[in-house]
Image: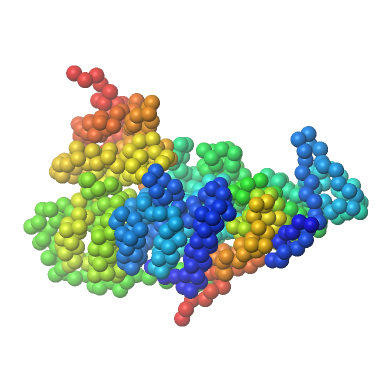
Amino acid sequence: MYRYDEVDARLVRERVEQFRDQTRRFLAGELTEDEFRPLRLMNGLYVQRHAPMLRIAIPYGLLSSAQLRTLADVARRYDRGYGHFTTRQNMQLNWPELAQVPEILAELAEVEMHAIQTSGNCIRNTTTDPYAGVAADEILDPRPWCELIRQWSTFHPEFTFLPRKFKIAVSGSVADRAATQVHDVGLWARRNDEGEIGFTVLVGGGLGRTPMIGEVVRDFLPARHLLTYLDAILRVYNRYGRRDNKYKARIKILVKALTVPGFAAKVEEEWSHLKDGPATLEAGDAERFAGYFSAPAYAKPDASAQEELERTLGAERAFARWFERNVHAQRQAGYYTVTLSLKKTGTPPGDITSEQMEAAADWADRFAHGQLRVSHEQNLLLADIGAGDLFAVWQLAREQGFATPNIGLVTDVICCPGGDFCSLANAKSIPVAEAIQRRLDDLDYLHDLGEISLNMSGCMNACGHHHIGNIGILGVDKNGEEWYQVTLGGSQGNHAALGRVIGPSVARERVPEVVASVLATYVELRHADEAFIDVVRRVGIDPFKEKIYAPHH
Amino acid sequence: MPRIIKDGQLVDDRWIVLRRGELGELPPCADDDDVIVPLDAWLADPAFWSDRPGRCGVWLAPDADLGPAGALVAGLPLLAVDFPVFTDGRGYSIGRLLRERYNFDGELRAIGDVGRDQLQLLWQVGFNAFVIKAGQDVAQSLAGLDCFSEHYQGNYRDPQPLFKRSRPAT
Ligand code: SF4
């Protein structure tokens, strides 16, 4: 992975000092709350329901074991011994003290970590596919490009005070596993007919109050022009995006107002001045960045280890089930990526304890070249596990409560912190996720249901990406009570779609029953092994609606 | 005399910013005052302003259309960009455009809600003079100019991004 050089490290230290001084001036009354707020947000610090919340950047979801150990240590000493992975591959601490935050940031800086631009109206952490570098369908390793974007976007002097937050996601493979269509800018790697590498550029996706799927503004951008083209997009947005109403300030609203061709034309005009400027990549630049992510030395596939694995899979049913759901074969024969599930019933989705972090860091050192990945689905991944190590990893994962065999299943809930922590929430999300998981505790049934995504947000801000869950659940406020609106048919991936609301919202107690009814209806309607999303696409939402809102007998 | 930050120094300042009143009128000024006038006032009668004994600069609002105006004002000794609130980042793009597209090489001044925590970014996009807002100490604000010793992306002061400058360790 990318290792900081002296300059990266110095910049992070300077940022810590800058923020330390800003915090001091705020506490001394030299900065007003209004002056301090944007500054603290740009350092990932929110004021939440109980305490400040600190969001720590995990650039494109890549972590070293040393970094994870530091997170464990920081969570233990400054917080309550756990952290929360977000849908944007970052980590949130829910209970730090404001006055201690500069100290936390200083400790994080020791392991090349920070909270730079994890909030605020600036360019946020760039996200990507957790299978980068190991996916069979990869066109281009997205990580070097993410690192280029990280450097370009960090402290960008022109784009630090945008109309609203700005999120970029990069997909390097055929299947989009980075939810690029619901980002302000989505980049899809592709090759043109001449074999040249480039990106299809999508703009204007996003969830929140006005969910929209991003649209293509440039079909093929040669990769060497990536940064100047991004400069052009951001400049158009910075100058013309709305600033009078925060709900209309995302780039999607500007794209809509100008129309896609109108917006694209403005970007092209701006780009005509910036194209071929100093940020254009020259021969060797892309290769140098690729070199930071060079593959480990893979051993030749070990036939006996593979046979042994097959035998164990045949003999151990629980292991086989875990292998089926939580293990992905890599393009490197004989190697696998293991997902440590953070979706165990009874634990808030995406939460991880300090002890679990330390254990995972140890396994990363032992089995996975000291690296880990965080997924958009809020799980933790270990890549490059040899066939012969899988059984050992499974046993260790079980001891730490990481081996719930539910990756991609309906209990692999994507969920925001909701009303338990977030001051913007209309409703709680964590207890609802748990109630759903409890209701669906029959593993055979779950596996029979197959791949279904269930996403939940505690309010319209949609941090839990409910619009793009096959089943989406949104907390709403009904006369001061917590109610939930259910959508069906949303999806991420190459053909991202927004779910449709099935009817009036339901009370908290009814949510598990509604989900169960949706699933039962699916089982009735499916042909052979037709997936849930395909059934919803085929029959629409009406059959589901009828079941749920039918008068009870 | 008010003090501002210019080219990294504290200096006395005699420029007066003319902002329109509620009825759209400009406040009175003496003939030999150095004034910074709104863009539309200047565009309406450039000769009037250049014939006065005092010097004249122009200030731009964040939504200023640089279209033809950019080239016209680029010959003035001073341009200012107004920041109604410091979180309104449009002025950063305007600064860069004035410098890089219209080749403005006079004094580029940030006015309005300008404080110490924005100075280095403003400097990087081309501003060289800063009128620090009321309530913040001008002399202490100087420290805001060099919080960071490096920058990743190219900017007006140094167009080369870091990845072009740093060479891989052998
Ligand atoms: S979706 Fe709403 S409740 Fe959930 S974390 Fe985001 S802002 Fe908070």
Q: Position of residue A96 (x, y in %)?
A: 38, 54
Which colour assignment does the render follow? rainbow
Q: Quadrant of the N terminus of chain A?
A: bottom left
Q: Is residue A215 above or below residue A319?
A: above
Residue at image location 20% in from the left, 51% down from the top: A404
* Quarter of the image that includes the C terminus of chain A: top left
Question: Residue farthest to the left?
Answer: A315
Q: In the rendered picture of this protein, how many numbered marks are placed on residues? A: 0
Q: Is residue B72 visible?
A: no
x, y percentage for residue A452?
A: 27, 42
User: Residue A524 or B84: which is nearer the viewer?
Assistant: B84
> Residue B165 at x, y = what percent?
56, 73
Residue at 74 percent of width and 53 percent of height: B80
List the single residue furthest toward the front.
A28
**Going 10% across and 53% down the picture, which residue do you hit?**
A317
Q: Nearer the viewer, residue A272 or A249?
A: A249
Please give left or right for residue A15 compared with residue A362 in the image.
Answer: right
